[in-house]
Image (cartoon, grey):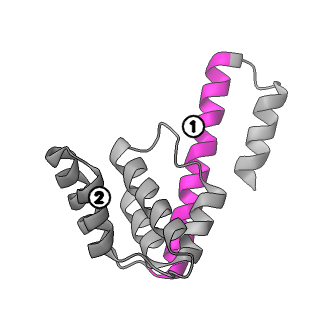
Amino acid sequence: MEKPLIAAAMRSRQNYALIQHYIDTKQKTYSAEFKAVIGKIKEYYDLDRDAEAVSGEVLMAQIRENLRSEKLVDKLSDLIGESLSETSSDLNVKAAILAARQQEVADRLAATLSTDGAASNPKVDALIEELNE
């Protein structure tokens, strides 16, 4: 799920805005590398308000400049490279965003059920309604 999301965020500011609006990229569901790359994409768009897409080369240059760990730079570089090879259409991107959102809500529902118990719980009802949406 992470690679299509990174690819979508890099291809289009609009896709990035959808990702930021609909999914919580800080969830435990996502890897530390994913969170780092999404953070760098955010910095990229924040720095250049007119940018409509992220240049992979520029993004990697910024990562190399800001991170001292060569191992982490290599991991992020691999993740970005693999993400850029994704060839999803806009419809597929939106489907990936929706699937990620559904997974987040399902994870929260499972956590609520395991900690708060019974299905008659208002928190559970709210999460089920959100999942159905």
Instruction: Please state, as top left, top right, bottom left or bottom right, where the C terminus lies in the image.
Output: bottom right
Q: What secondary structure predominates along the stretch shown in magenta?
A: helix
The residue tagged with tag 2: helix, strand or loop?
A: helix
Asked whether the residues under the numbered discs 2 and 1 touch, taking CB atoms below 8 Å apart as contact, a structural biologist would say: no
Question: Residue at (65%, 58%) from the top-left corner?
Answer: 22
Task: Return the residue at label 2.
Answer: 63
**Can residue 85 be seen at all in this image of the molecule?**
no
Q: Is residue 55 left or right of residue 126?
A: left
Question: Looking at the image, is 11 positioned above or below residue 107?
Answer: below
Instruction: Please state, as top left, top right, bottom left or bottom right, where the N terminus lies in the image.
Output: bottom left
**Residue 106 falls within the magenta-colored stretch:** yes
User: Toward which corner of the image does residue 58 lie, by quadrant?
Assistant: bottom left
Question: Residue at (57%, 62%) from the top-left corner?
Answer: 19
- Other-residue count near label 2 (Cα within 10 Å), few / some / many at <14 / 14–19 / ≥20: some
Question: Looking at the image, is 6 positioned above or below residue 36?
Answer: below
**Residue 65 falls within the magenta-colored stretch:** no
Disc 2 marks a residue whose amino acid type is Ile
Q: Which residues are magenta?
A: 89-115
Task: Return the residue at label 1.
Answer: 107
Question: Residue at (36%, 62%) from the top-left corner?
Answer: 3
| Place of residue 46 in the rendered image (x, y in percent of width and height, measured from the top left) | 54, 66
- Other-residue count near label 1 (Cα within 10 Å), few / some / many at <14 / 14–19 / ≥20: some
